[in-house]
Amino acid sequence: MAYGPDQILEGAGNTDYERYIRTNELLSLQKGPDTWKHRDELLFTVVHQTSELWLKHCTAEAIEAVEYLKKDEIRPALRLFPRMFLAVKYCHEALDMLEQMSPWDYQQVRRALGHGSGFDSPGMNSIRKAIPSLGVEFKRLLAKENLDLVQLFVRHTEFEDLYLLAEALVELDERMYLWRHRHFKVVERSIGLKVSGTQGTPVEILARLNSFTFFPELWDARTDLTNYAIAEEGEN
Ligand code: HEM
């Protein structure tokens, strides 16, 4: 087929847009009506596939940020955090769409999933692996300044970049927590909690994961800071 002079890229597709974005491949990654058990399989697949893509992006940014931090370059790492926040936020917001499915319709979709389970989400598993490495570098940088967390918060203007890094870690942790809680409610609304998942694990297990946090010490530091302020006031 002859293409217009506007196309300069190689690859499948009529236009450079299709070739670069690889829309042919992308749009063929969802089952069609001929193989659906229920039409909401499209909604379910789109939410999961887009979430996987955002989590892939989020992980790439986290890995890059770790590389900067290893070189003691906090500023360029800080620029990558809002990208991570937004990626997690988009996954969080995408969960709204799943509640457009009626619980009964979801039971039909569920029949198509085999043993497919969120526990095996490559995106979620890779970001979960990357986030602790950010914490390792933060702790190293804190030790390098001979600071504990309370002193970092008290003297935050002196150690601006390090303080902003601490807050970025807390924000990432909080956004992951919010996703987990939102997901928990979506699960409860769709299939209930006193049942088993597609791999046979009791769904109630998710309730235990709700209290998980990546950086407990950064949260505990708030309590320590309050106690420090009370003690300081007592001295005056
Ligand atoms: C109607 C929508 C959804 C339902 C009913 C649902 C259901 C479940 C259930 C029952 C579990 C417990 C493990 C199991 O038995 O499979 C689980 C875990 C999980 N799901 Fe979903 N899920 C939904 C949407 C999503 C979406 C959009 C994602 C995005 C990637 C996701 C990611 C995960 C992850 C990562 C876990 C592991 C536990 C955790 O990290 O909290 N799920 N899901």
Image (cartoon, rainbow, N blue to C red):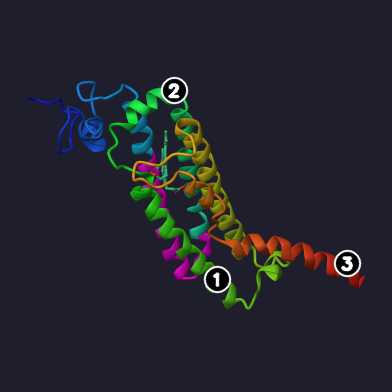
Relative to 26, is 10 on the left or the right? Answer: left
Q: Which mark is residue 102?
A: 2
Q: Is residue 75 above or below residue 26?
A: below
Disc 2 to disc 3, how far (Cα)?
A: 56 Å
Disc 2 to disc 1, how far (Cα)?
A: 46 Å
> What amino acid type is highlighted by mark number 1?
Lys
> What amino acid type is highlighted by mark number 3?
Glu
Disc 1 to disc 3, how far (Cα)?
A: 29 Å
Relative to 163, is 59 on the left or the right? Answer: left
Which element type, helix, strand or loop, lies under badge 1? helix
Q: Quadrant of residue 198?
A: top left
Q: Position of residue 34 (x, y in %)?
A: 20, 21
Residue at the spot x=47%, y=27% of the render? 99
Residue 139 appears in view: yes
Residue at the spot x=50%, y=35% of the render? 188
Marks 1,3: beta carbons within 8 A: no
Q: Which residue is mark 1?
A: 139
Residue at far right of view: 236
Q: For mark 1, does the 10 Å Cα neighbourhood hold few (<14), some (14 to 19), or many (20 or more) residues?
A: some
Disc number lying in front (2 or 1): 2
